[in-house]
Amino acid sequence: MRQETLIHDMKNVMMLMDLFIKKIDQALTNNDTEIAKKYVAKMGTKISVLIQDFHDLLSGQNTIKEENVAELIKQICSDAADLYNITIEVESYFHSSQKLHLTKFRNAIINIIKNASESTSTKLVFSISKDSMLIQDNGSGFPDEVLASFNNNSKINSTKELGNGEGLQSVKDVFSAFDWDMKLKNTKKGALIKV
C-alpha cells in the first residue's frame, strides 16, 4: 500500500470520528440521550472495524471475501448517509458476487461518499448493472484539473481547498486491483464516476 493512501485513509478515519462526535454532541444538546446512545454504539462498532481494517492493511493481510457488490454498497451507504448528511440510493439491476478486499473496497466507497458531500451534493446514486457501476451526485462536479489529470492517468493535483485528489487516486487504485476501469465525467446533474 502506498504511504500516501494510508495517510489519506487515516485522515478519513479522523474525519469520520469527528462526524460521530458532532452527532453525539448535537443529540446531547437536544437532550436526546437515546439518539446519543445510538451514535456512541455506532461509533464503537466503527472503531472496532477500523482497528481491524488498519491491522489488515499494515500487516499486509488480505481479507478477501466473496461478496454481493450491491448488498455491500447498500450496507456501507446506510452507515454513512446519516453521518455525511447526504441522501444515498443504490439501484441494483444485477446481483453479482465478486471477490473483494473488504477493507480497501469499503474505504473506496466511503471516499466517494465523502467527496460527494464535500462538493455540496445532497444526493448520491449508485447504479449497478451487469457490466458497470455508475455513481452520480448532484454536486458541483469535478474541478477541470482533476478531470484532466485523472482521465490521462497522471498524478492528480488539485488546487481545491478540500482535497488534492489523493482520495480519487486511492479509489482508482482499489478498483484497478479488481481489474475495473474507472472514468470521471461532469454532467449537467453533477459528477459522474463510471466503473
Image (spheres, grey):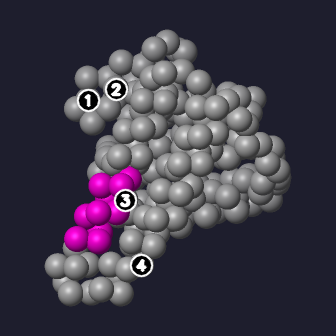
Kind of residue indicated by mark 4: Lys
Residue 134 colored in magenta in the image: no
Residue found at the far left of this picture = 29
**Cβ–Cβ below 8 Å for labels 2 and 1?**
yes
For the N terminus, the quadrant is top right
First in sequence: mark 4 vs mark 3: 4
Residue tagged 4: 38
Residue tagged 1: 160
**Cβ–Cβ below 8 Å for labels 4 and 2?**
no
First in sequence: mark 4 vs mark 2: 4
Kind of residue indicated by mark 2: Asn
Left or right position of 187 against 133: left
Which residue is depicted at the point 46% across and 65% down? 44
Kind of residue indicated by mark 3: Tyr
Which is more foreground, mark 1 or mark 3? 3
First in sequence: mark 2 vs mark 3: 3
Left or right position of 133 against 89: right
**Distance between mark 4 and mark 2 Cα atoms:** 34 Å
Q: Is residue 52 visible?
A: yes
Q: Categorize mark 2 by other alpha carbons within 10 Å: few (<14), some (14-19), many (20+).
A: some
Kind of residue indicated by mark 1: Lys
**Distance between mark 4 and mark 1 Cα atoms:** 34 Å
Task: Give 138 or 53, whichever is nearer the viewer.
Answer: 53
Task: Give 88 or 99, whichever is nearer the viewer.
Answer: 99
The label number, if any, that marks residue 164 in the structure image = 2
